[in-house]
Amino acid sequence: MSLQVRTSIQDAIAVVSVEGEVDVSNAGELRDALEAAAMAADGTAQSVTVDLAGVSYMDSTGIGVLVGAKNRANQAGASLVVANPQRNVARVLSLLGVDRELGLQ
């Protein structure tokens, strides 16, 4: 399944909606989208919500992208939270212990 990533602005928060499977073959696309979403048009950092409702699978590469994006957001004084993961993705995030770090909603 291919990866689709869309970004919109809702209440001054960049919402990155992801659909498909995130793995080593396309994690760079997600990383690029998160980096672009983290910067407002004026170059300042902004808050990002990553909506994973449409993600059926995520491997360790994708999880690493999320953790890296969270760390970069924190360093820039912004926030990044992960929202709406499907049960199997939420379980993996929890098993790895990154669910709290990612502000899982």
Image (cartoon, rainbow, N blue to C red):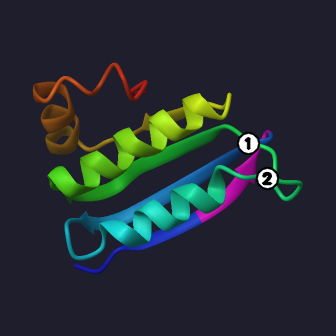
- How crowded is the residue under tag 2: few (<14 C-alpha within 10 Å), some, or many (20+)? some
Q: Is residue 82 left or right of residue 97?
A: right
x, y percent for residue 10: 74, 46
Q: Residue at (19%, 68%) from the top-left corner?
A: 24
x, y percent for residue 102: 39, 29
Q: Residue at (37%, 69%) from the top-left corner?
A: 28
Q: Specify the label residue 1 is tagged with.
A: none
Q: Nearer the viewer, residue 56 or 79?
A: 79
x, y percent for residue 18: 42, 61
Q: Is residue 72 above or below residue 25?
A: above
- How crowded is the residue under tag 1: few (<14 C-alpha within 10 Å), some, or many (20+)? many
Q: For the stretch drawn in magenta, what is the main secondary structure?
A: strand
| Tag 1 residue | 45
Q: In this view, does 54 lie above or below 96?
A: below
The CA span between labels 2 and 1 is 6 Å
Q: Which amino acid does label 1 sit on?
A: Ala
| Tag 2 residue | 40
Q: Which of 65 and 105 is in front in this view?
A: 65
